[in-house]
Image: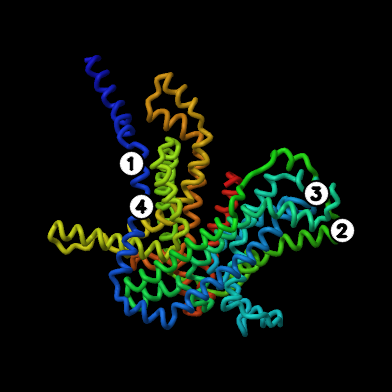
Amino acid sequence: MAVATDQHTDDRDALPQRVLHRLNPAVIGTVLAALFALPILALFALALSGDREYLVHIASTRLIEFSFKSAQLAILSGSIAALIGVCCSWLVTRYEFAGRRALGWLLILPLAMPGYVAAYSWYAITAPGSKFEAASGWDLPTVSGVSGAAFVFALTLYPYVYLLSRNAMEAHGRLTWDVARSLGVGPWGAFRKVTMPLTWPAAAAGTALVVMEVLADYGVADFLGVSTLTVGIVRAWSSFSDPAAAAQLAVLLLFGALLALGGERAARGRRQFSSTNASDNRNGPRLRLSGWRAIGAAAVAALPLVLGLLVPAGNLVWLAIETRVSPSVLPALQGTLLLATASGALAVVLGLTAAYALRSGDGMAKISVRMVQAGYAVPGAVAAIAILSALAITQSMINNVTGTNAAILTGGSILALLLAYQSRFAAVAILPCEAALTKVRRELDEAARSLGARPTQVLTKVHMPLVLTGLVTAGLLVAIEVMKELPATMILRPFSLDTLAVTAHNYASDERLAQAALPALILIAICVPLTALLNLVRPDQ
């Protein structure tokens, strides 16, 4: 009996090992790549199957306007965000003044403010006859159009440039700056000739992220009256119920996003993210400011935080206090938490799987995972139309095989939403999982196996405690992105499911800004603490 029991135990223990052996890195990479590639291929198929007369019509009427407005908005927003991000990173890394340490951390928080929420609030502040104008007597320029949208984008997206530029400046240390100063170069000359060339790759990468976010946006552009390609896609889908036309515009927007990514690579050229000895940064003293110089530096560094987070959030509080709570807010909160939790958990599984595939060193797995990571450049509206196309083709194939006319795989479902979120935000989960797993040395695996540990035990008892922080980071990052995502959610959500983002946008679109304030505030109240937690747990991410 004991022999039989031992044999049964051995067979049972061998099962996970056989399963893991069959799931080789190439297979894992191929499956992950399909998550990104197949919907995009389906998108192209749907675009080609559509009526070309619509494309000819829109090309002769609105396409030039859509393309020009998208490019104009992206360039203006990226330029302003780059200026803010580089200046703030320069102040907090090179100078010492009162509040510098706190500002260095707080300047990240406007990233938690959804752009469309900031747009609602700033419009409510600056619109003619607003409560702010009546109370203060100030007649501010109305935040609207391309300039207003660029203002909002720059204030909410500059942390991309700030984070990467700050890390680059800290990595290069102050040794190069001190050498330049010792050779008689002034502060401005040292910044222009030494610091900026070394920081340029990081600043360019951050600016490219800003541009891709601007191209992917729907809420800000739609509310402030900017006719971009994303706005055209959503209108073609929702107003005209023409998926083929939406797919044709989505293909153009996809090319625009990839062009922005390629432009960043070309602008950066062969300059890489390198660093000098990290101790240079710790040992070299910052230039201490005092008096009005210190006050000026603190004021300049704090201004983006005030305008990007505190002012719009404060105005929303003012509006929400004087407005009755809508019964739609609670279901929207529940829907938001449901989608964020499910997407975050699924992203952790996919991210960890991809990280293990990369750890194997398999060439095919590496190519496939990098293809999945490129999905972050795909705007949400494009991802939504791509998922709809893929599900429609799959459903048609199933119906042809079974001889039925079922509609199981359709848009307007949580499944479609989860697929779109993963194809868009998988890269956000893969990066922290990969970074965490690279810190697990292979010697630990060998030591555990030499002590008789099975593969599942190595995974649960050795790897998991070491990569847990990275997994939490991945889950939170994706959850935050999902909660803020608007165009994909609007296109794919079931009619019975609302989110805070969709609810706030619907109220704002009807000019009911006071009713939009509460769901927008709740969204901020969730995203800001999570962003702060991420900065405390994994500041390097």
Residue 329 in view (yes/no): no
Q: CA distance from mark 1 to mark 4?
A: 13 Å
For disc 4, the marked residue is 35
Judge depth for marks 2 and 4 and give the one in front. 4
* Position of 204 relative to 496 (above/below): above
Q: How many residues crowd around disc 4 within 10 Å: few (fewer than 14), some, or many (20 or more)?
A: many
Give whichever of discs 3 and 4 has the lower sequence position. 4
Give whichever of discs 2 and 4 has the lower sequence position. 4
Q: CA distance from mark 2 to mark 4?
A: 57 Å
Find the residue positioned furthest to the left: 403
Name the residue: 59% across, 71% down. Answer: 150
Tell me the quarter of the picture where residue 449 sits.
top left
Q: Amino acid at mark 1?
A: Val
Name the residue: 38% across, 63% down. Answer: 384
Q: Is residue 525 left or right of residue 422?
A: right
* Position of 76 relative to 54 (above/below): above
Give coordinates of residue 209: x percent, y percent: 55, 59
Judge depth for marks 3 and 2 and give the one in front. 3
Q: CA distance from mark 3 to mark 2?
A: 26 Å
Would you say the residues marked 1 and 4 are in contact, meaning their CB atoms lie under 8 Å apart? no
Q: How many residues crowd around disc 2 within 10 Å: few (fewer than 14), some, or many (20 or more)?
A: few
For disc 2, the marked residue is 291
